[in-house]
Image (tube, rainbow, N blue to C red):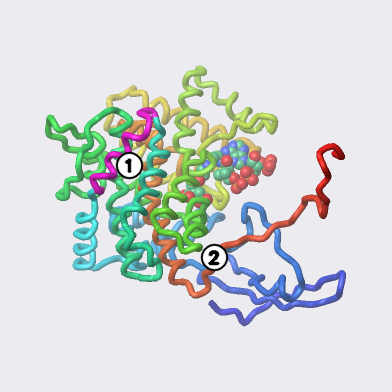
Amino acid sequence: MKNTETITLIDNSTGKKLELPILRPTVGTPTIDVRGLYKELGYFTYDPGFLATASCQSAITYLDGEKGVLRYRGYPIEELAEKSTFLEVCYLLYYGNLPNEKQFDDFQEDIRQHTLLHEALRSFYTGFRRDAHPMGIMVGVVGALSSFFHDHENVHDAKLRQRAAHRLIAKMPTIAAWSYRYAHGLPFMYPQNHLDYASNFLYMMFAMPTEEYTPPPLFVKALDLIMILHADHEQNASTSTVRLTGSSEANPFAAVSAGIASLWGPAHGGANEAVIQMLLDISNSDNDVQHYIDRAKDKTDRFRLMGFGHRIYKNYDPRAVIIRNMCHKILQQLEPGNDYQELFDTAMKIESVALKDDYFKSRNLYPNVDYYSGIILLAMKIPLNMFTVIFALSRTIGWISHWNEMMQDPESRIGRPRQLYSGEELRNYAKLDKR
Ligand code: SDX
């Protein structure tokens, strides 16, 4: 990172000047290196929600919110969505380049060897109530992996980090599918190593020990596409959570468990579930779209148009456009007039009304990745409470790639933000009868 340029800060209260280095990225927004600010001028910076704060250097994913650009390791998401597969994208994100044939064969074989869970982990599921949200099960079971793999205690060993990454990529579909099977009182289906990644997950979700099961090819393609699109997204809330947790040298499974917990929120990964809930509510209210648009604009109403808006994208989320097209393809394969078509039509109507409304236009609020993804998952008979689980399953590769990048970064240190203190300055203890 070149930093020959500087920006001059003048403290008008003391006249003191400070030259701060400007760090230029490969592409995108330059950053001011403020690390000397407190030592030289005695100030912190204040940026709740980190709207203008770079927490790290990263070479994994690039976003341009104004232009609606998303690239994994420099490859446009549109090209990867059309030409790649989720497991190949996993290799790209973790290792930094697309694999050659031997590298990919070896990688896929290693993943296949780690899809099973320790049999003792099965009993973890029976400790949950049958109506437990699968995300709660994921947080618990993934966190528990840290107690099964003690060889991951040394997070500074690249080989052990690689093994943790492969284990997580391989085991997440099994853990996710079993959380669905447990909630529905169904027998656990074991991974089939002859199946590809997406087919294996659908097999473990929907197969029965009593009969043959082959997942519909279009559903396999749609799921693989959804996982590619959700694989990584720079320093989002859950990835930042994994980085902050991992910065204390915590076990990678514990760090990913923290990421799952963060993703669960409706403002983040939980939005895909909330979008469908919103569309169902609208459908059940005689499709009064304008009423919900007005509610979303009403500051006295906590309701937000779920699946709309994004911290970075002030244009269409490129993933939303790709998913909307896949959604259309899936619906065309289904019986005409199916329920999902109605949800899709409602979603399209909301999008068209909102994007003509100044409230949304002036705030650059467009559909994001969560807006259409739920309709595809519903059409695949994946239940609402599994949507964010699919997001977590997909984002695991992003989380673990950022964790691995951080553990190699010489500038990385334990994350410990400061604050703008607004409490009482000093008070002395008063006895009870004196208060
Ligand atoms: C994901 O960071 C990532 O990269 C996340 C993600 C990933 O891949 O990891 O892309 C995945 O989390 C997508 C986002 C999913 N969440 C939702 O769809 C929930 C609905 N969206 C919002 O809650 C909101 O848009 C956020 C949380 C996504 C972004 O919030 P910001 O950047 O903090 O924006 P903001 O809340 O400051 O909103 C700016 C203005 C406000 O109005 P004013 O104060 O200017 O009057 O826009 C309004 C907000 O009230 N606004 C909305 C809105 N989103 C923002 N108003 C109505 N409906 C909405 N959805």
Q: Is residue 340 above or below residue 53?
A: above
> Viewer-proximal residue, 54 or 427?
427
Q: How many marks?
A: 2
Tell me the residue at 56%/32% (across/down). Answer: 353
* Quarter of the view holding residue 180: top left
Helix, strand or loop for disc 2: loop
Label 1, ligand 1: CB separation under 8 Å:
no
Residues tagged 1 and 2 counted as in contact (Cβ below 8 A): no
Helix, strand or loop for disc 1: helix
> Viewer-proximal residue, 188 or 27?
188
Position in image of residue 165 (x %, y %): 33, 59
Tell me the residue at 51%/41% (across/down). Answer: 265
224 sits left or right of 195 in the view: right
Tell me the residue at 37%/48% (across/down). Answer: 144
Residue under label 1, please give it.
Answer: 176
Q: Is residue 294 above or below residue 257?
A: above
Q: Which residues are magenta?
A: 117-131
Residue under label 2, please give it.
Answer: 414
Q: Earlier in the sequence, mark 1 or mark 2?
A: 1
Asked whether the viewer can see residue 96, the reply is: yes
264 sits left or right of 365 in the view: left
> Viewer-proximal residue, 356 or 103?
103
Q: Amino acid at mark 2?
A: Ile
Q: Amino acid at mark 1?
A: Ala
342 sits left or right of 49 in the view: left
Position in image of residue 173 (x %, y %): 29, 46
Tell me the residue at 37%/62% (across/down). Answer: 93
Position in image of residue 39 (x %, y %): 72, 74
**Which quarter holds ligand 1?**
top right
* Quarter of the view holding residue 134: top left
Which quarter of the figure is the C terminus placed in? top right
* Quarter of the view holding residue 23: bottom right
